[in-house]
Image: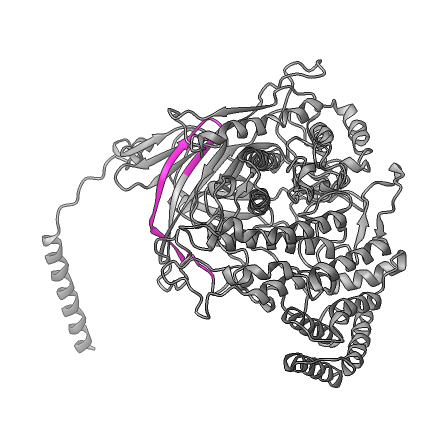
Amino acid sequence: MRKYLHWAIGSLLWLSSTLQAQEKNKKPALPIPQADTVQAKKPVSLAEKVKNCRKTTGLFTLYQDTVTGSVQLYIGKNQLGKEFIYQSFSLNGPNSLFLNQSMHRSNFVFRIDRNFNKLEFTMVNTAFYYDPANPISRTRNVDKPDAVFFSENFSGEDSSGYLINADNLFLSEKMDPVKPASPPSLFGMFSFNLGNLNMAKSKYFQLRSFPRNTDVLVDLAYDNANAFISGGPAVTDPRYVRVRIQHSFIEMPDNDFRPRRDDPRIGFFTQQVTDLTSTSPVPYRDMINRWNLVKKDPSAAVSEPVEPIVFWVENTTPLEYRQTIIDAGLKWNEAFEKAGFRNAIQMKIMPDSADWDPSDLRYNVIRWVASAQPTYGAIGPSFVNPRTGQILGADITVEWATASFAPILDELYNGQSAADQYPLPFTAPRGDGQPETSCSLARDLKAQFLSAQTALEVDDAGPEAIQELHKQFLTYLVMHEMGHTLGLNHNMKSSQMLSPSQVNDRSLTSRIGLMGSVMDYPAVNVALDRSKQGDYYTTKAGPYDLWAIQYGYTPFTPDQEQASLDKLLDRSNDPQLAFGNDGDDMRSPGKGMDPRVNVFDLTNDALSYAEDRFKLINNLMGKLLKKYVKPGQSYAELRARYNYLNAQRNQMIGVVSRYIGGVYIDRSFPEQHAADKPYTPVPLATQKKAMALLSRYAFSPNAFNADTPLFSYLQLQRRGFNQNVAGDDYRITTTMLNNQLAALAHVLNPATLQRITNSRLYGNQYSTADVFDDLLQAIFEADMKGNVNVYRQNLQTRFTEVLASVMDPKTPGYDGVARSAALYTLRKLKGQLATAVSTNEETRAHRANLVFLINNALENK
């Protein structure tokens, strides 16, 4: 015990001495201040945060650091919870990705909310409506999750608002997915690709802010170190590409604008809204896109608007075309007069001294550009308030190469194999790789124009005639694109307004136009008999255009509007007001139903008009050598002119083929008591006439004889090493087979064959078996007692392969009726080949191959 006591006392003495030593070395403690003397750390003021920044004030205030270029965005507290409109535009980028100048891109409503120390930017879903009187409206936010596209801590605050760093908002793809996220069929592994966004190399180009909108223009940098597709001559280096994008924040309009309902009998661009509290079988509250026109004098039948629609012709426009463009735009005023507005459209020239930029969305601009690789030729987009359909601004861009006299010498037919262009089986319509809402009129119209110019030049027409052709062409182009900016979509049925005898009657066309609308894709009107030539294009708003603008823009009081619109719509079955848009058109094989809703046709007897066009093309072929073989130049122009005419032939074949298996559509409502039913099969006689025209001008052994003298001259001009590795001779058989397959791809498409069978149940008299039998005769009968030329060998082989594919159960899309008809036709063909006569080895080899194909198909059945 004593031992442990001594140990404890020793330990206490050691601990005491240690504590005394520590206390001796300890610094004297500072006196504790009283509460009223505490110096709190001051937060950095907003002024301090932006002291090195350039300020841009307007709807939103922007601060850009003058050293780093970084941008901060100031949001007022009174702006929280409010809705704004976002709209983006591409201003400079690769045409092949539709990022070139004046492409209107993302458009949506958004709001900004505070979430603790953050600000959230949320995209608002505007696709649904709820009647507030219905209790179910309490579920308006159920199963519609928010889309928060940006969230950022605020770095500063004052009594009026918040400051956030905006670089991650504007130098990003959060609001506009710039890099296409498209399926491989459009932008696949063998297509030009931007690569990845490099924020470090991206920068601000310009900041603009006005009371009603704020614009941020950025140059987004993309890197693709492994790029192996060049992107074309306009892309300097595919590894490093910059795209200029304009982000626009727009104040939600606060006005008396009333949305106007859409109707299927008339064609406007729309904002689609579904009423989720309705019990209607069609619970749609879709709104048309239109400008906010208000009469200065509401009591007047016709009044000038408070704010007219003003278009500025950009100072890049060639001087010689400016007046034509101005006159074309003003021609729309005739339609607005019908709606009660005088001088609704105003056209002005942008002065060279202008201090505003055409990309400023406060100005509607018609601009003229010269792109390295035009993808559209001309385009007329507008941007809207998604809540109401009010158009807030618009631009029209015209390509120099498209709208000038300049010929386009690139190949319309580049030797693409028929197997690539029309792959077996014929199961899907082909797309052209453009956005759904795009307009390819200018490109197609230019080809039509050059075909007509060729016809005039070959017939030694004077310069006055060609100048008039070009003026009408340019007028039509501008009116069409301006129609889009007024809210109108395409009307591919309007070219059926006049008869073949009427289209060249200028006393009539000067009064009502050549077609019902300028919103169609027409064939250029070149008369087979030049002495009877009328207008080449319609150059005024047609009856449909006047009616559509009247529907869209006539002011009505709320109590009169419904009845007044119904009265206007009651006229929809007037032949001059015929309407059918891109959803109904038949430009692609297997697409659509009504052959009257189509591109590149003309008159209410499109088959007779097409036959005249076939004859005209064949007449012109023999005159091309004399006109376009010129000293001092290569044969490139001859080749291009030939391609334009052959493209016309291809288009006419497409037009004619759509009448086989076609069904006429009438969208009148029951109370209109229309003479036609909603669906009426094309009469048997019309379908048979179409088949006879295809037999004569596409399938017959001598269908392309008029072209023969040209083939040894169709030489592409050498430029560097642009020769085809397989030789630069013209791909004659491929070109002609493509013409023939332009018909077969549609007629033998599973959608067409199924429609033929279905329509048999409500009036169609042309069965699938009958169609196959007529094709068999058209493609084989003429040479069963002799030799087969190379055109027919390719055609017959392809037709046999298609029949084998149709009858194969593994081929998707074809029904039992089509498979039975294909089997029956193949067996019939085999029997005919057994007795066919031939005198040369080539024909014998060809027919032996056909028998092999048939036997193989029948054995695998």
Is 198 inside the magenta-drawn segment? yes
The picture places residue 376, in percent across and down from the top left corner, at: 53, 46
- Residue drawn at (84%, 47%) of the image: 678
Q: Any magenta on residue 542?
A: no
Quarter of the image containing the N terminus? bottom left
Q: Residue at x 47, y 40 (%)?
A: 400
User: What's the coloring here?
Assistant: one colour
Which range is magenta? Answer: 191-216
The percent position of residue 543, horizontal first and vertical second, equals 73, 32
* Residue 824 seen in the figure: yes
Give x and y (percent) for residue 40: 28, 36
Name the image quarter holding residue 843. Answer: bottom right
Taking 601 as reference, is 404 left or right?
left
- Residue 658 lies, with reference to residue 39, above or below; the image says below
Number of numbered callouts drawn: 0
Front residue of 145/271: it is 271
Direction from residue 473 to residue 335 in the image, left or right? right
Work out which quarter of the rendered image holds the C terminus and state it. bottom right
Is residue 116 visible in this depiction of the protein?
A: no
Please tell me whether the stretch drawn in magenta is mainly helix, strand or loop: strand
Residue 10 % position (x, y): 14, 69
